[in-house]
Structures are given as structure tokens and as C-alpha cells.
Amino acid sequence: MADDLGDEWWENQPAAASSPEPSGGKEGEDTEMMQRDTAPVPEPSSEETKQPTECFLTKPKETKEETRKTRKWKKKKISEILAKSEPKPGTPGDLQQLIKNHYRDNRSVIELEELNLPDSCFLKANDLTHSLSSYLKEICPKWVKLRKTHSEKKSVLMLIMCSSAVRALELIRSLTAFKGDAKIMKLFAKHIKIREQVKLLENRVIHLGVGTPGRIKELVKQDGLNLNPLKFLIFDWNWRDQKLRRMMDIPEIRKEVFELLDMGVLSLCKSESLKLGLF
């Protein structure tokens, strides 16, 4: 049938049928949308990306009150760390090192070497497993015989030094199992005048004294206490107060201890007539 149409069929077709669709048709719209989607996005200029300097504010300075609060917080944190840390018992080497540190600035090298105490003057240190009574029984097994032969006034056989009057009372209460018939005297300043203590030492035979280094030092100064008959000097070394300070951690106490050591204690240790213990 197509052959019967001849060449006239192509010539007689209307113009609309032979011409392509105008650009405004559906196909043109799709092409335009595709071009828009694939077109590159222009990069922002440097002025658009630049942020205002007002966004970067400097940290305001802390006030004195805020700084004080920060320091208090840090101290509290240090105390918490110390409270959680495992305590270590004191050793004779700790006392030797404190002595060297104390006299380092005003003594020569030779004089510092002379301050070294012999190992024989140190008693066995407490390993934190003893009570005071059990510790004293271990280091002084002949205590009963010693106190029976002691008859000198203005002196004691054993001195126990601690940091405060309250601590001294605690230690005296814990001596029940050790003291026996021994006479114990409180050697601290709280509610007790030094004149009263001097009179008691002059009129009675005292075997054991428990007190603070400051009051013991004053009694020695006023000739109320003679250190020559002293056989045992015990430091309440390992106990800590509410601020977790040991006795020798407190500057005032440490100063008084060394002043007392200079009043004849060190020479007695070197002569091996006096023994030192760290409880």
C-alpha cells in the first residue's frame, strides 16, 4: 500500500507533522531543569565566610573571692587523695632526714655528719599493727623492773611526745595494759600551769610522762625536768589529725622538737643511754 502512495504522499503532508516540537514543549522544559540541577554552585566570597571578631570573647579575670574558693577546693581535693592513700609507717631514716634538713642551712658538712645518730639508739618502729601498749611491751620488755628501781624525782623513765593535749589524753587512756603501777604525768599546757607541774615533779616520783614538746621543753628550761635519767623517748609519729597532718608535719611542733633535741637529747642518744622510738 505504501508503494501506491508514491512520492506525492511526502509532498502532501502538513507542515506540523514534519517539523520537530518547539523548544517550549515538554522536552525543552526537561532539558532546562537538568541544566539548572547540574550547574555548579558559586563559592562564597571571603567577606561572606569571615566571622565577626565579636564571637571570640576573652575569659574574664577571676575575682579574689573566686580565686580563694578555687584554692580551698584544691586543698580539699588534696586531703581526699591523702585520705584514700595507704599510710606508710615512719622509719628511723625519716627522722634522720628531718634532722639533716633542719640543720642544713646553719651547719657545715662535718657538723652535719656528726649529727648522724647511731642505729643502736633507735628502737623498732611501729609497723601500724600495734596499739600503744603492745608497742611499748615489745620495745621495753623490762619495764616492770625499771620502774621499781626508779626513785629519782624531777625526772621520768619514759617520755611520749605528741602534737596536742587532746592527743596526749588519748594516749594516756591507751596505756592501761602497759603501765601497771607506774605513775603517769600529763605534760601539756592546757588547764595546767607550769608551776604546778614543777612542784609535782619535785615532790613525787614519776615514771612516765605524756605531753607536747613545747611544755616538755619549758620544764627542762626551768630545771623542773632532768633528762639524764631518761631511758626512752617515744614520738607519736604516725598519727594524723583532722587535716591529715602528722606530728612532724606541723611547723610549730617540729621547731619545738628540734629545740628539745638540742637541749641534751642528741648527746644522750650518741652516748646510747637514751633510745628513740617511732610509734
Image (spheres, rainbow, N blue to C red):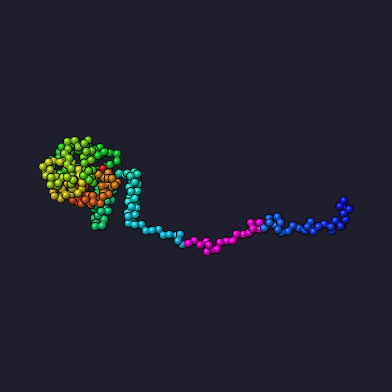
Q: Position of residue 272 (x, y in %)?
A: 21, 46
Instruction: Looking at the picture, tell me which residue is in the foreground, 33 or 217.
Output: 33
Quarter of the rendering containing residue 237: top left
Q: Position of residue 21 (x, y in %)?
A: 74, 57
| Horizontal side of residue 173 vs 68, given as left or right | left
Is 38 magenta? The answer is yes
Instruction: Looking at the picture, tell me which residue is in the foreground, 67 or 253.
Output: 67
Q: Position of residue 188 (x, y in %)?
A: 18, 45
Residue in the picture at 73% in, 59% down:
22
> Magenta part of the protein: which range?
33-52
Quarter of the rendering containing residue 235: top left
Is 196 magenta? The answer is no
Q: Position of residue 77 (x, y in %)?
A: 35, 48
Residue in the picture at 27% in, 51% down:
98
Which residue reaches farthest right? Answer: 4
Instruction: Looking at the picture, tell me which residue is in the foreground, 266 or 113.
Output: 266
| Horizontal side of residue 190 vs 30, given as left or right | left
Instruction: Looking at the picture, tell me which residue is in the foreground, 18 or 184.
Output: 18
Residue in the picture at 18% in, 45% down:
190
Which residue reaches farthest left? Answer: 203
Residue 142 appears anywhere in the view: no
The quarter in which the C terminus is drawn is top left
Residue 252 appears anywhere in the view: yes
Q: State whether residue 61 is above or below residue 143.
A: below
Quarter of the rendering containing residue 172: top left
Residue in the picture at 85% in, 56% down:
9
